[in-house]
Image (tube, grey):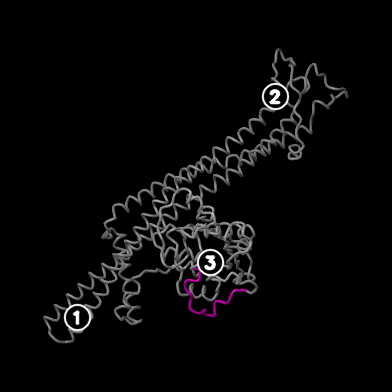
Amino acid sequence: MSIDPDKELFDSIPPPPASSPPPAPVGGVINDVVVGGGGGGGGVERWSQDGYDDDDDDDADDKAREGGEIDGGGGGGGGTLVISVTDPQQIGEGRNAHTYYRIDVRRGQYDDDPIASVRRRYSDFQWLFQRLHAERSGSIVPIIPHTQAVQLSKRLSEELIEERRVYLERFLRRVQVHPELEGAPSLAAFFSPDADAFEAARAANPGNADHRAYDDDGEALSATRTEKAIEKVKHLWVKTSVKAKVARGNMELEETTDGKKMEEVENYVDALDTHVKTMSRCTLYLAGLSGEVSTNMHELGQSLFGLHQLYDPETSVNSSGSSLDSAVIPTNKRSGLPSIKAISSVLASLSAVNKVKHDENQTKVGVPMREIEWMIKAARLAIKRRKNCQLTYNTYLQQVRNRESTLEKTRVAAELLPGNGHADKIGDAERLVEMARKSANAARVELDVVTQRVFREMDRFKRMVDLELRNLYANLARVEVEHTQQLDGEWNKLLNAGGGVSANDGSYKSMTVSPPLTPSRDAEMMMI
């Protein structure tokens, strides 16, 4: 195994200080950790740095990914890996305090012994998120929902730490089975039990840095470190100029042959975002409505119970000390109406049912709806990455045009004024033009790769959104049906207490009634 199952990062000591530079990163540390595959030895997927097969996934595969594990089938077993994030530990004190989360990789959901364990900070997960975007531009990388915590007490609170733990585990499980992210170099570094190797990878590859094949094209032309630094500055200057022209409408970015199809993708995501925002607003309101109903019914029940304690016609006496004349004002039993105490008890039960309904709606409807919004945000980030690749490609094209213009001017000057070192200037200009053309060609290849990746991702994305929405509203219907039956049963308790009361000339007529409602002790205690 490339991962040492007996070695755990930060098992008993704090992480190494940032001031001590770690050694160079070690690549391929988890190349032989099996992610999927059957017991028969066939069809095995691996975390590696050698690329991946892009097989289309059916609905069963999508649901398996949601569960954080992939089972390749077969009768042998042992082909499933499960990732868990547990045991958050605080390191340091005061404003220097931070939390490390333990990441375990097991061969099955019920396997007690992990085959690998590491500890990572929240910022390490954010680094991985950014690096996956840089290394696999165009991929729909799962979002890590972020709760801003400015105050130290909130940042180290158990509630926030647990919330992040759940989100981080969900993030890793989805990354683990993402077909476009398999083999990303940052995954090898992130899961490496070698702390120095991971810190070196972070230092060498900042999260927001691009990772493109054409970044080092100048090296093939024997460019020096200084020349490459100058080239980067020039490239940044031209890129800023191109962005400004596009923003002012003075320039349109050159597209590939798939530009029309890419425009349809962008229009689909825009329309989907608009519809889902409306759906989310309405759905979350409906899901939260039972919470408001529960609160109001609880307060109403408490007030009625308090009123019952002030006056109970069954036990009250008149001002002369004798019992009330039931012939004039009938008691609860004779009137056919439920007592105030019974009504308060029913309202307590209704409040409890609505509270349970609210909690189930938040879990089965509210959380999935917010996850769909995060999925759309992730899709937008993928499209944005593709747009950045397009901008980079157009930047190199502009550099080619600029340098060709400079080369032409240099040649004209050489013809008008022979000598004066024009031959060397022409040679340097030609070399710069060649560098720009090579970079532009590499950028075009990268743009094509990213574009096709976006198309593959959007095919999966559409199916997943459709499946999640249908599942969400099916859950909403189940919750409504289940609790509506319970609510109807509680309301019927009041109706079954009697057929009502009629009035004639101010006199009351008693009616045959069912046995009076006996409030449950739980509901009575709730009112108290």
Query: Residue 256: which quarter of the image?
Result: bottom left
Q: Give above or below for 14 relative to 484.
A: below
Specify which label sits upstream in the sequence, 1 or 3.
Answer: 3
Instruction: Residue type at mark 2: give it.
Output: Asn
Q: CA distance from mark 3 to mark 2?
A: 60 Å
Q: Which residues are magenta?
A: 14-30
Instruction: Residue type at mark 3: give it.
Output: Ser
* Residue contact at pointers 3 and 2, CB within 8 angstroms: no
Query: Residue 520: which quarter of the image?
Result: top right
Q: Is residue 351 left or right of residue 521?
A: left
* Quarter of the figure with the C terminus: top right
Q: Is residue 433 magenta?
A: no
| Residue at mark 2 | 496
**Label 2 packing within 10 angstroms: few (<14), some (14-19), many (20+):** some
* Residue contact at pointers 1 and 2, CB within 8 angstroms: no
What's the magenta bit mostly, secondary-structure-wise?
Answer: loop
Instruction: Residue type at mark 1: give it.
Output: Ile
Element at label 3: helix
- Give the image location of residue 303, x and y in percent: 72, 36
- Residue for point 54% across, 44% down: 365
| Residue at mark 3 | 123
- Give the image location of residue 177, x and y in percent: 48, 58
Q: CA distance from mark 1 to mark 3?
A: 49 Å
Element at label 1: helix
- Give the image location of residue 84, x and y in percent: 58, 60
Q: Give above or below for 319 relative to 446.
A: above
Q: CA distance from mark 1 to mark 2?
A: 101 Å
